[in-house]
Image (cartoon, rainbow, N blue to C red):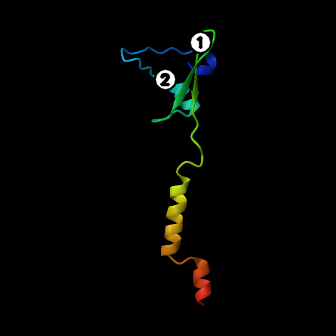
Amino acid sequence: MPLSHKKFLEANVTSKGQVTIPAEIRRRSGIKKNTKVRFNMMEDGTVQMRVIKRCKMEGKEELITTIQDLMDKYKTGIDYLKDK
């Protein structure tokens, strides 16, 4: 039954303290391999789990460097026009 029809989902805790997050929650929350989550203990004893969103700029420095390296290696359209 979809989460929208249930008030809660349950999971078991293993002997190592691990919990499998139900598939629908992973899918709707964007949780994939190596996604970090944060647990907050509330005053009433409930535990709140939040997905830590990756910075959208993460890894872009490497991409920019690669693009700049390729631009230095190959002539661009502007370079061809300058040569004529």
Return the residue found at the far left. Answer: 15
Quarter holding the C terminus is bottom right
Per the model, the C-alpha gap separating discs 1 and 2 is: 17 Å
Q: Amino acid at mark 2?
A: Ile
Residue 82 percent location from the top left of the image: 61, 86
Mark 1 secondary-structure assignment: loop
Q: Amino acid at mark 1?
A: Thr
Answer few, some or many: residues within 10 Å of disc 2's Cα (few below 14, many 20 plus, some between 14 and 19): some
Number of the front mark, 1 or 2: 1
Residue 2 percent location from the top left of the image: 58, 21
Depth check, front residue: 52 or 77: 52
Return the residue found at the far bottom. Answer: 84
Q: Which residue is mark 2?
A: 21
**In the rendered image of this protein, does residue 64 appear above or below residue 40?**
below
Residue that appears at 49% across and 69% down:
70
Q: Which mark is residue 46?
A: 1
Residue that appears at 55% across and 54% down:
60
Residue 18 percent location from the top left of the image: 41, 20
Quarter holding the N terminus is top right
The quarter of the picture where residue 3 lies is: top right
Residue that appears at 58% across and 81% down:
79
Describe residue 51's horizontal placement relative to residue 18 as left or right. right
